[in-house]
Image (cartoon, rainbow, N blue to C red):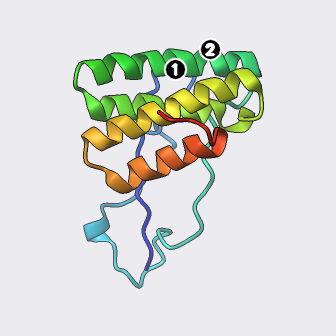
Amino acid sequence: ATRSLVVVVDSGDPSMTDITAPGHDVLPDPGSVDSDSSSGLDEAPVAAADVSDGLSVDECVLKAVEAKERGNGSFKGGENAEACQAYQLAAQYLRRHSEVPAAKEVLLSVQTNLAAAQLRLELWEDAAAAATAALALDPASVK
């Protein structure tokens, strides 16, 4: 059976849905699930709402820059896991707009910063993936 890990990050955006609120299903503890049962863990994942849903390109860039700045503060303070979360959120805002020059510029910076934070955490494969994503945006990037 294949299992997926879902990480929930508090984006600080009050419009985001609280998955702990009544009416939201919570997956059972993995240790309490019979691997042969129909628990739903082996079913296709349900797509989560994109953080950029309903936002314009400019709004996405603004929110991404805000998240990137939080990440930069965390990175400078040695809080690398928090920096990664902020950079990942920034990238999520820009994912749909990577061909728009302003978004692409911010996304390139976010991906290289994410790689640096992941290197500090010794997350080698994740850092390589972030650096590869940056190079896909700008093959001439040297950062």
Residue 55, x across and y down, in percent: 73, 23
Q: CA distance from mark 2 to mark 1?
A: 13 Å
**Other residues around mark 2 within 10 Å, as few (<14) / some (14–19) / many (≥20):** some
Residue 56, x across and y down, in percent: 76, 21
**Other residues around mark 1 within 10 Å, as few (<14) / some (14–19) / many (≥20):** few
Question: Residue at 40% across / 47% down in the picture?
Answer: 127
The answer to which image quadrant residue 104 occupies is top right
Does residue 8 lie above or below 14 as drawn?
A: below
Count of marks placed on residues: 2
Q: Residue furthest bottom?
A: 36
Q: Residue furthest left?
A: 78
- Which residue carries the number 1 mark? 13
Nearer to me, 140 or 28? 140
Question: Residue at 36% across / 36% down in the picture?
Answer: 116
- For badge 2, the amino acid type reads Leu
- For badge 1, the amino acid type reads Asp
